[in-house]
Image (tube, rainbow, N blue to C red):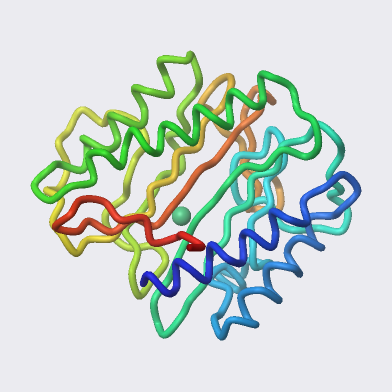
Amino acid sequence: MAEAGRITALALREVEKAVRAGISTKELDEIAYEAITSMGAKPAFLGYNGFKGSICASPNDVIVHGIPSRKVILREGDIISVDIGAVYKGFVGDMARTFPVGKISDEAAKLIEVTRQSFFEGIEFCRDGNRLNDISKAVGDYAESFGYGVVRDYVGHGIGRKMHEEPSVPNYDTGRPGIRLRKGMVLAIEPMINIGTWDTVLADDGWKVSTADGTLSAHYENTVAITSDGPRILTRAD
Ligand code: MG
């Protein structure tokens, strides 16, 4: 799983390098496909429930699951969330980041940073013996302390030989302890945080999910293993 995670992270690094005003999300998708397959892996998203892409490309108010398109062209000041997955030797890596396109507003930069930090608040609790909701609550409480909306309709997940396995990993306090965490478990923890409401709308294409109020959304995800030494992020390039 660490190898799958490493390939995923290396591929996302190639996508990040290409992010600039004027590029289409389809071109970013092609870069991801090339990077993943050149390392002997398969894009985990391509063909998943019929999805047409190796990445989900979600600009600005799009939260998740944006379909790569030649018609979606990044502009200076945009933010773009890229979710990517790779399958290597039967195991899956899954991660996401939100990147700035050129110079972005202070408001957008703060959203990206708080979303990133909410992930790290959560994985502190990714330890043998803890409860699942310890993670969820830490992520959600941190993001909500900035007045942001924490997406509830889409959540993280267990991951292994399949991309989406039990359990679901919410990013907010569910009020229930949830399962006990054990070493050897691997979770995709992925806060999706909005400047405004957490409420979502699904596009007619059946995939693209946007904020109901049109405010910006950011995403930060890693595949994390619970080890005897604590949390280990598997989606790392180094
Ligand atoms: Mg995921």
In the image, 205 versus 36, the foreground residue is 36
In the image, 119 versus 206, the foreground residue is 119
Question: Measured from the top left, where is residue 205 in percent x and y?
Answer: 71, 53
Compared across the picture, whether 20 is left or right of 131 comes to right
| Residue furthest to the left | 129
| Residue furthest to the front | 238
Q: Picture quarter containing residue 36?
A: bottom right
User: For the point 84% across and 49% down, which residue is it?
Assistant: 72
User: For the point 79% across and 30% down, which residue is it?
Assistant: 103
Question: Measured from the top left, where is residue 226 in percent x and y?
Answer: 22, 56
In the image, 49 versus 127, the foreground residue is 127
Q: Picture quarter containing residue 12?
A: bottom right
Residue 35 to residue 79: above or below: below
Compared across the picture, whether 176 is left or right of 93 comes to left
Question: Measured from the top left, where is residue 200 in percent x and y?
Answer: 56, 33
User: For the point 22% across and 37% down, which residue is it?
Assistant: 133
User: For the point 68% across and 73% down, which residue is it?
Assistant: 33
Compared across the picture, whether 26 is left or right of 222 comes to right
Instruction: Count how many numbered circles sit on residues in the image.
Output: 0
Question: Measured from the top left, where is residue 76 in percent x and y?
Answer: 86, 35
Q: Picture quarter containing residue 145?
A: top left
Is the N terminus in the top left, top right, bottom left or bottom right quadrant? bottom left
